[in-house]
Amino acid sequence: MRVAPMTSTTSIPAPSAPTGGAAPPPALTQLDVLESEAVHIFREVAGELERPVLLFSGGKDSIVMLHLARKAFWPAPVPFPVMHVDTGHNFPEVIAYRDDVVARLRLRLVVASVQDAIDEGRVRELPGGSRNPLQTIPLLDAITTHRFDAVFGGGRRDEEKARAKERVFSLRDAHGQWDPRRQRPELWDLYNGRHSPGEHVRVFPLSNWTELDVWRYIEREQIELPPIYYAHERDVFSRDGMWLAAGDWGGPRPDEPVARRTVRYRTVGDMSCTGAVDSTARTVADVILEVAASRLTERGATRADDRASEAAMEDRKREGYF
Amino acid sequence: MGTQTAHPTAPGTPGAHHERDLLRLATAGSVDDGKSTLIGRLLYDTKSVLADQLAAVERASQARGGDAVDLALLTDGLRAEREQGITIDVAYRYFSTATRAFVLADTPGHVQYTRNMVTGASTAELAIVLVDARHGVVQQTRRHAALAALLRVPHVVLAVNKMDLVDYSQEAFTAIAEEFSAYAAQLGVTAVRAIPVSALAGDNVVERSPRMPWHTGPTLLEHLEQVPVHRDAAAEPFRFPVQYVIRPRTAEHPDYRGYAGRISSGSVRVGDEVATVPGGGRSRVAGIDTFDGPLAEAHAPRSVTLRLEDDVDVARGDMLVAAHPETTVGTDLAGTVCWLAQAPGAPGARVLVRTGTRTVRGVLQEVGPLLDVDTLRLEPASGPLALNAIARVRLHLAEPVLLDEFADHRRTGTFLLIDPLDGATLAAGMVGRSPLAGSLEAVGRCREQ
């Protein structure tokens, strides 16, 4: 992902670096502090827990997480596998990106397949075709099968109201359920990942990042993303006020006319419920300007399943969704 | 990267390159003081509220029959809270200006206030204590000030809210500010800034109020932007809890051995002599490594990987510290705890003690006296510690740990007590003589007279 040396903030001091009494090193910027905090979280999990796994969707948050995990353990490789919860309704560009990263970094990839779960009768397809809510069961099954005890997720507290109270280390019971009243207070930087057999912790290294922080970090670190994050031409149709991509997953219906538009995606997810937005932002800098000026949060703009009710996220978190 | 991926960064593109720093802060106050409205105002006026969130709040405000948008609804997170109209846990909010980003720990004033405020204040560099201008300094205000002092939050802001309801009276404000400052000074808190605001009307939160021309100090947001956030690394001793030993054992790095961690306090340079705690070994720093290249010097709170010149025995749980001055290491830990669990804490209880990256077994030998945050007096313990109790304790540990006094070491002088059976976090602790007990007792006596 990282293609060129970073030049902006982590400068390598010259051999004649100042000695005692001279100017102190430059103060850490907000992104430096957030990066160091996330690296600390990765190392805490690797030091305290037995079998971590990193949820990797090919979305920008999971890509930034993986970048931070590489930084945390360099020059050693990332010491845990990545897991993709695969709805079967994927953007081909994202799958290509995933496979390329896995091969290049020699990662172990675990795929938790919604299609397999449907085929095996563990979950049933929903009317309307959205598979986002169906991810919970394959995810929990994979956690059980592989006995993962720590699951890194890219969730951020700024995304949604129910996430504002999420811990960095979030305890889940054997059913993956989140009980807001059972969450442990987190003080200083003393994270407590202890759990009973069968339980696990969800860990959110990007808890204190905002969407804009993620984009500014992508720019600073020159991290590559799947091309669907940038403006491109695509056949789309309108549903629930969003542009959905025409594709194999089942859309559009006959009464939904398809048009070719210049769009980009703000999140990556199941094709059936991840909407594109009209955009001409073709570079990271364009996207940052667009996000900074944006009047819609990324979940509100592009995730159909969050609109069902004001408490939608809270309900799904209780059920063991990310 | 393969041909499938885009790399659209144009070198030298402008925009969003102003370097911000980060301030962590906590708010304390009750719903009645208008805390949610104040936070809503900070978010709203810094344009941190986006259109769909605002639309949801407008719909909810109308559904309740309100005519104006209720900014407090921006911060009420969980459904149980919205239904009951209370906040039940610490919530984190994010807003930013051109020069600084803010992480705000929003702690409720009523329910389990001690546990929540202690949690929120633990990482805060600044605490906003909110009072209602009509009521002035009340019991809860003193309680919040005491907890901020106990957690050694470096900066305290007194936000005197609802100034619109006292006709923007300078006299009312000054009296409250003076009473609070005198009280805070007795707690050892000298960096107090009092600001008259109306969160509802927006006076002096972000925008300067034309209705209070007598206030010549900063608005709340101006003050939040000006408070220094950078600790003086040179003045603090170096502390580095080892999180993880990096040993790649790859063809490229067959013999690499690095100690990964985040600098808790102070700074470190290549060539510095360091000691290992609790082992007592000594070595010098051979290299400070990062993914982005080696550093000659690094300071808190940066995450780095250190290599040492000698082959000393260092593992997770150890701490690398400045070789001078000497540190205190031991198995008898005296400190102050805030009990965070429903399960009581009784003398004789077996616990796990977590400090830095080290976890050791221990026994809770002595419990008490208790600090009463309402009367500010120390009371003898009459039984096991209950949820929200603040008490002096003595622990005996199975293995030695670094005993940094919290009064001098706000990062490393901390510990958790953990239930060895179910892993629950039982208590948050601060090592050493209680930084407050003496002065609090004195304050309590003064108030009796």
Image: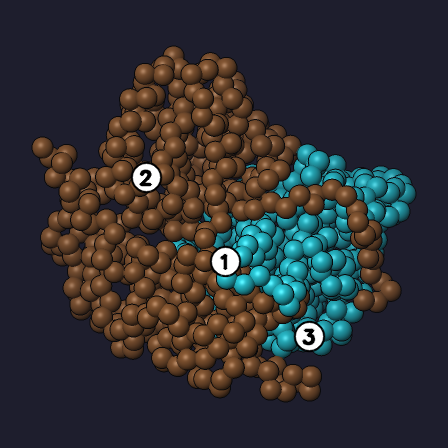
Chain colours: A cyan, B brown
Label 3: few (<14), some or many (≥20) within 10 Å? some
Image side of residue A126 versus residue A21, left or right: right
The image position of residue B261, as x and y in percent, is: 50, 68
The secondary element bearing badge 2 is classed as loop
Give amino acid for label 2.
Thr
Query: For mark 3, what is the residue?
Result: A107
Q: Residue at x 50, y 15 (%)?
A: B210
Query: For mark 1, what is the residue?
Result: A21
Residues indicated by labels 2 and 3 sit on the same polypeptide chain: no
Give amino acid for label 3.
Leu
Q: CA distance from mark 3 to mark 1?
A: 46 Å
- Please name which of the two marks, 3 or 1, marks the residue nearer to the observer: 1
- Please name which of the two marks, 2 or 3, marks the residue nearer to the observer: 2
* Residue most extreme to the left: B449
Q: CA distance from mark 2 to mark 1?
A: 29 Å
Query: For mark 2, what is the residue?
Result: B190
The image position of residue B423, as x and y in percent, is: 36, 67
Residues indicated by labels 2 and 1 sit on the same polypeptide chain: no
Residue B107 seen anywhere in this rendered image of the structure: no
**Splitting the image into 4 quarters, where does residue A309 fall?**
top right
The image position of residue A315, as x and y in percent, is: 52, 48
Q: Quadrant of the N terminus of chain A?
A: bottom right
Give me the chain letter of mark 1: A
